[in-house]
Structure formats: C-alpha cells, structure tokens
Image (cartoon, rainbow, N blue to C red):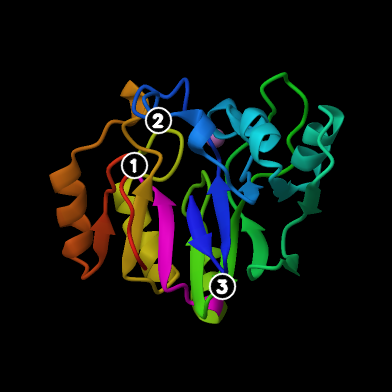
Amino acid sequence: MLEAGGSKLLFDPFIRHNRLAAHIPLSEIKPDYILISHGHEDHVADAQDIARQSGAMFISNFEVVSWFGKKGFEKLWGMNHGGKHTFDFGTVRYVNAVHSSTMPDGEPGGNPGGFIIEADGKRLYYAGDTAVHMDMELIGRHWRPDIAILPIGDNFTMGVEDAVICSDMIRCDKIIGMHYDTFPFIEIDHKEAVRTFSLKGIKLSLMEIGESKEV
Ligand code: NI
C-alpha cells in the first residue's frame, strides 16, 4: 500500500492465502485505489473483497478491469501500455513488463505491466512481475524514478542480479524488493541480496510485512 497525494493505493493484494501475510486482518485494508499489474492469482486474490469493503477503484490494463467489471464492480479505470492518466492523487503511467497474464479462472488478462506513479513531487516505479528488459532504459532516460519497487525472487521474475541491472537502467539507487520468499521457489538470501545491490551503490530495502516507510 502506498499513501500518496492524499489517497491510499494498494498494489496486487495477496494476503489471506499468502503464508507470510495471512495474519494481516483483511477488514482493516481500505484503499481508495487498487492497482493490478497483471491477472495472476497471487496478485488479484483478495482484490474483490477489498474493493467491496472499501469502494476502491480498480486501475489496471483494460482486460483486467473488464474482468472485474464482469464480477459486478463499477469503479474501473482501464489503461494500456504507454498510456497515462491523472487521478486526484497524481498521475499513473502503465508501462511494459515481460511476464504473462491470465486471470485465476483462465480468462485472458491482457498484457502484464508496471506503473509509474507521480504524486507529491516524487516518482515511484512499481515494476509488477517482470524480467529485466530494454524498455527499462526509457524509464531511466525520461522518468528517473526516486524510488522503485522491483521483483527480486527469481524463477518467475527477475532475480537479484537482474534487478541490479534494472536499477542501473532506470537510474534509481533506492529499491524496495518484492516478490520473494512467498513460495519455496522464490526464497532468497536477504543478506546476500542487500550486499549484491550495495556493491553497485544501490540501497535495497527488504521491508517486513506490516512495516511502513517514508520515501
Ligand atoms: Ni505473475
């Protein structure tokens, strides 16, 4: 969850069936917006219940928000790659991710993406699930995020080594790691990860579940 521009933005909620987050009471999560990077179950699992209790608006690619539309939700904002839109909290740009995107019931989930958020005079890049790819150069060249949230768990997304390459491409030296330790396939050595980033002068934060951080 990101608090920016007076709003609460929740990304890819996976809580109740996440062995690391199952203790978090879902009823206390009340965002204004739910941003979904792609349709995989571990990114949309709790989205419907949270949207129902909070009245949050979905922001994602057109196919993903249309899927939520079929489930009866009306507060939907569909985007596609390269597009940006200004909301009351700031601007969201939907950018490329190299991954896949199928909804939990097998329906198509469009193409996966990430988000560049501009709010409160700062830029944040939330990469979603992705490999390292050359379009990240564009992000570094034109949007230079102040902070980036990158997957580092390997196997399904980039691992630490490639996330360091990504950090270099996007020209960002403050990284928050995500998409690690949730499943046995993506467990990482925390100390080694922090060290690998620090050798390149990059600060990697591995936040505890429930921890807050000012950026
Ligand atoms: Ni995924």
Give left or right: position of 173 versus 26: left
**In the image, which residues are magenta?**
143-152
Q: For the residues marked 2 and 1, what is the alpha-carbon distance in whole angstroms? A: 8 Å
Which image quarter holds the C terminus?
A: bottom left
Report which residue position mark 3 lands on.
Answer: 119
Amino acid type at mark 2: Ile
Report which residue position mark 2 lands on.
Answer: 24
Q: Residue at x 56, y 73 (%)?
A: 119
Q: Quick check: which quadrant has ligand 1?
A: top right
Crowdedness near tag 1: few (<14), some (14–19) or many (≥20) residues, C-alpha within 10 Å: few
Percent coordinates x, y for residue 199 in the rendering:
16, 64
Crowdedness near tag 2: few (<14), some (14–19) or many (≥20) residues, C-alpha within 10 Å: few
Task: Determine whether the residue tagged by mark 3 lies in a helix, strand or loop.
Answer: strand
Percent coordinates x, y for residue 6 in the rendering:
57, 66
Name which of mark 2 and mark 1 comes first in the sequence: 2
Percent coordinates x, y for residue 213 in the rendering:
32, 59
Amino acid type at mark 3: Ala
Task: Determine whether the residue tagged by mark 2 lies in a helix, strand or loop.
Answer: loop
Q: For the residues marked 3 and 1, what is the alpha-carbon distance in whole angstroms? A: 23 Å
Residue 81 occupies which quadrant of the picture?
A: bottom right
Q: Is residue 115 above or below residue 43?
A: below
Is there CB contact under 8 Å for labels 2 and 1?
yes
Residue 52 occupies which quadrant of the picture?
A: top right
Amino acid type at mark 1: Gly
Q: Residue at x 51, y 54 (%)?
A: 127
Report which residue position mark 1 lands on.
Answer: 210
